[in-house]
Image: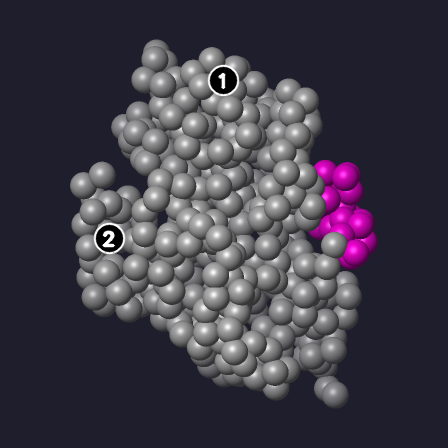
Amino acid sequence: MSTTHLTAGFLPLLDSVLLVLAREKGFAEAEGLDLNLVRETSWANIRDKAALGHFDIAQMLAPMPLAASLGLTPLASEMIAPVVCGLGNNAITVSADLWRSMADHGALGNLAAGPSGAALAKVVAASRRKLRFGVVHQTSSHNYELRYWLAASGIQPDRDIEIVVLPPSLLPDALGSSGLDGYCVGEPWNSIGVTTKGAHMVTTKAAIWQSSPDKVIGMRADWAQAQPERVAAIIRAIYRAGEFCADPANHAEIAQIMAKPAYLNAAPDIVGRALSGRFEIGAGAVAQVPDHFIPNASAANFPWKSHALWYYSQMVRWGEVTSSPTNAAIAAACFRPDLYRAALAPLDINVPVLDDKTDGTHDRPYQIAGTRGSLTMGPDQFFDGQVFDPSALDRYIAEQARS
């Protein structure tokens, strides 16, 4: 088998793990790929270097291909995402001072999104200054999850608080220097904030919207169209890495790999928290979050068009793009379940037969139709009880505009 050299950009986050394992455990090599991983310092660098073709593929924020295709980026270009890097992994972390105030106003310390949000709303209403929260990029899942949680809790993000953008690795230091009151980020940067800055985790992505995507493998659409065999090989390598990551017997080895200076450069015990779901959340408290990061189960690597449309709905909600059938079609076209199915067909992998699903109606595991029977899916509830039906996109957008 001939070998194809690919350059892939990534950020030091736990959910780069499938890309790292594809290289470190030979899944990419088995597909004929020589995968060269390039560590970057910010999502802006990932965005721009991918657009310029400096990277063949990259770990991207799930909304990033949409933003590029919709013309919201400095170097707008048509991008696609044919495979997802797992579900979950984000959390919201606050300073020790803010946590004490939230606890005084009813926060429970169990990572439940509702009580934490209600307590924060009381603190915000009583505060004589605007609290400042950090996110990793404007068109990021973190920004939209934080805003969704705040708005559903009675806090208007652009009126009641300030939201700023910083690279993930700088967020704990910004919190520790009082530059931020809180932030939304992926692991290990919540755990690092707790361990090194006395911070407190208050809720998680899995508590705000269960079984939701966060990172994808993205690429230019023109490159993908010209390289269909390489795209299929990438999808298969990421899928195999997800299977390996999903086995708890491999977690200790994975934590050692990801802890290396080339990747997360963090202690293995901190890296391992997202893999096990067992977190030290602050002030000596421990919480178990079994669905914090899902690398393979529940069709975790499948690029649902409905997930792309939910992120699009948030772009509309927060004034980044106008609502139109054309823009909705552009957003949906960025996630490519057709390429995913075609790549996995030779492996006889059971994948969803539909491109869309309704989220928010299931609070326990449920079944969907797959290519070889049915697939077991995890719960997909939004913490505030909302339902996202992609066939009623305009109504959902209008309802959110009124909230």
The one of 361 and 213 positioned closer to us in this rendering: 361
Toward which corner of the image does residue 158 lie, by quadrant? top left
On the rendered structure, is 289 left or right of 209?
right
On the rendered structure, is 283 left or right of 92?
right
State the residue at coordinates (34%, 31%).
153
Circle 1 SS class: helix
Q: Which residue is mark 1?
A: 103
The one of 268 and 370 positioned closer to us in this rendering: 370
What is the x, y in percent for residue 107? 47, 22
Residue 41 at least partly seen: no
State the residue at coordinates (25%, 59%).
393
Residue 288 at least partly seen: yes
Mark 1 to mark 2 CA distance (whole Å): 33 Å
Q: Which mark is residue 396?
A: 2
Please tell me how many numbered marks the rendered image carries: 2
What is the x, y in percent for residue 275? 68, 48
What is the x, y in percent for residue 37? 68, 61
